[in-house]
Image: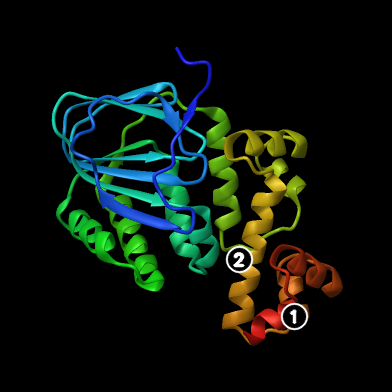
Amino acid sequence: MSDFIQVKNKIESSSLLKVSPFRKEIRKTEPHKHNSYFELIYLSKGTGTHTIDHSTYNIQPPVIFLVRKEQVHHWDLSSEPDGFVIILKKGFLDQSLDSELKALLIKLSAHACMQVQDSVFIEQVFQLLASETNFHIQEGLLKALFAKVSEVSLPVYQKVNKSVDLVTTFRELLSQKTGIKNNVAHYATLLHTSPQNLNAICRKATNQAASELLAEYIIAEAKRLLLYTNNSVAEIANSLDFSDGSHFVKYFKRYTTQTPSAFRKL
């Protein structure tokens, strides 16, 4: 057993998305993690096992595995694999203003393994993604892929990690369309825990405190409202649970280096 967990990086630092065929020569890998990206692996061929954290899955193609950046995983393949790998960085999602794309990813990432019932469309989208470089087209294809995977795949359940489950539920609450609350304590109450515990669990699972995850959602929604509505900055501030417009302006500038008005003029 190693003294440390190996960290692998399979994408250029300047790239936000990489889609490529699964390497056919892979058989057995050492336990490792990817600190800077989320990985979605689709296998149409192959036998053996894939271990993610404490759960080992028998590979029964067509199958999809989802590995979050904080998770440790390794392969033990007994035959030649075939399929695709998506490497997705947080920066890609930060650039996207499509809330449904993010909601679909949250839904999928709650599962480590999904058995695919209809693979024809999914394989076609993977092939398109592997050759596409335009951000907006990649964004649309990812959304189509995530929606189809959700529609035609069944989760393979293993023992639930309660901490990860809590973070997933927190993210689902943030993505609801009933109005965001700029208050971690509000969500902690809904999740039957304390703000301190929610912050600690989020930091352990994602390397971000609950307040940082909340800020991401607030800024993303603020950008959408600034770009796609005629609402005033004050009205947007109110809709995002800021009692004071000047506080919202300072908050927005802290995370984007721009005022809301300057962002709107771009």
Sequence-wise first label, 1 or 2: 2
Measuring from the top left, give residue 26's x and y in whole percent: 23, 32
Residue under the image location 74 percent in, 58 percent down? 182
Q: In this view, does 147 lie to the left or right of 120?
A: right
Asked if residue 94 shows in the view, the reply is yes
65 is higher (above) or lower (below) than 76: below
> Relative to 217, is 86 above or below?
above
What distance separates the C-alpha of mark 1 from that of mark 2?
15 Å
3 above or below 8?
A: above
Q: Is residue 47 above or below residue 170?
A: above
Quadrant assignment for the C terminus: bottom right
- The single residue placed furthest to the top in the displayed view is 1
Q: Mark 2 points at which residue?
A: 220
Q: Quadrant of residue 145?
A: bottom left
Q: Mark 1 points at which residue?
A: 233
Is residue 195 left or right of 265 when viewed as pictured? right
- Picture residue at 62% right of the left edge, 73% below the top: 223
